[in-house]
Amino acid sequence: MLELRNIVKHWQAPGAAPRVLLADLHLQVSSGETVAILGPSGSGKSTLLKIIAGLEAADSGQVFCEGKDISAMPAHLRRFALMFQDFALFPHLNVQDNVAFGLVEQGQSRRQARAQALAMLQRFGMADHALGRVWQLSGGEQQRVALARALITRPRVLLLDEPFSALDAQLRASLRAEFAQHIASWPMAVVWVTHDEAEARAVGARGLELQAGVLQRRW
């Protein structure tokens, strides 16, 4: 289980007074559960994900995973995966090596990692692109590769930051059902941030909205 307790974060624009971005925020997400978080731009959704991932520190409060306080744990030790809207793939690596990257970083041999990456690409219907370059793929194909790369390390928590916002509406609609199906087969806590309520309702068993720094239940 992922748990946030009393998370507070202030933000200050140049020349302006600081304002509260996250205000004594609480959140629990069980393993196998997907929670969708809605909110307009600037509401603090991405900052919240960065705090969970360990990429940014809260001003106060604690992050727990499986009952352990990991607030001071570096991001690379948390075994969390974060997916961005811009795919964040490595252009100098082929598709297979992009997916294998996390396993190599964990100490697996490149040969073993590539074999597992190919098997993962087969699950996503992308095996034929294994030796291709990521910049040759469509936006939807790149996001499939990004999800395959995230899942192959078997993360404890998966964080998705507006994963489809760079794609057209028709492709978003087809991908969200596909992604929800893939994610449901992995035992991890999932936090999916989006400004699109239709997307949130399609993927999240529970929906929350970030308003004035506090999460309010939507469904």
Image (spheres, helix red, strand yellow):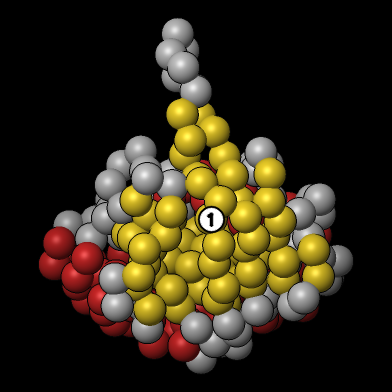
User: What x and y, as percent, mark residue 20?
Assistant: 48, 35
User: What x and y, as percent, mark residue 7?
Assistant: 61, 51
Whether residue 195 appears in this view of the structure is yes
Q: Which of 4 and 88 is in front in this view?
A: 4
Q: Is residue 211 rendered to the left or right of residue 20?
A: left
Q: Quadrant of residue 209?
A: bottom left
User: What x and y, as percent, mark residue 132?
Assistant: 47, 61
Q: At label 1, which amino acid type do we have?
A: Leu
- Disc 1 element: strand
Return the residue found at the far bottom: 185
Determine whether 200 is above or below 92 in the image: below
**Residue at 43% from the left image edge and 13% from the top image edge:** 16
**Residue at 31% from the left image edge and 42% from the top image edge:** 41
Q: How many residues crowd mark 1 within 10 Å: few (<14), some (14–19), many (20+)?
A: some
Q: Is residue 171 rendered to the left or right of residue 23?
A: left
Q: Which of 112 and 166 is in front in this view?
A: 166
Q: Is residue 183 rendered to the left or right of residue 51?
A: left
Return the residue found at the far top: 15
- On the image, numbered disc 1 is attached to which residue? 25
Return the residue found at the far left: 170
User: What x and y, as percent, mark residue 87?
Assistant: 44, 53
Determine whether 66 is above or below 197 in the image: below
Q: In which quarter of the image is residue 109?
A: bottom right
Determine whether 150 is above or below 75 in the image: below
**Residue at 48% from the left image edge and 68% from the top image edge:** 191
**Residue at 65% from the left image edge and 79% from the top image edge:** 1
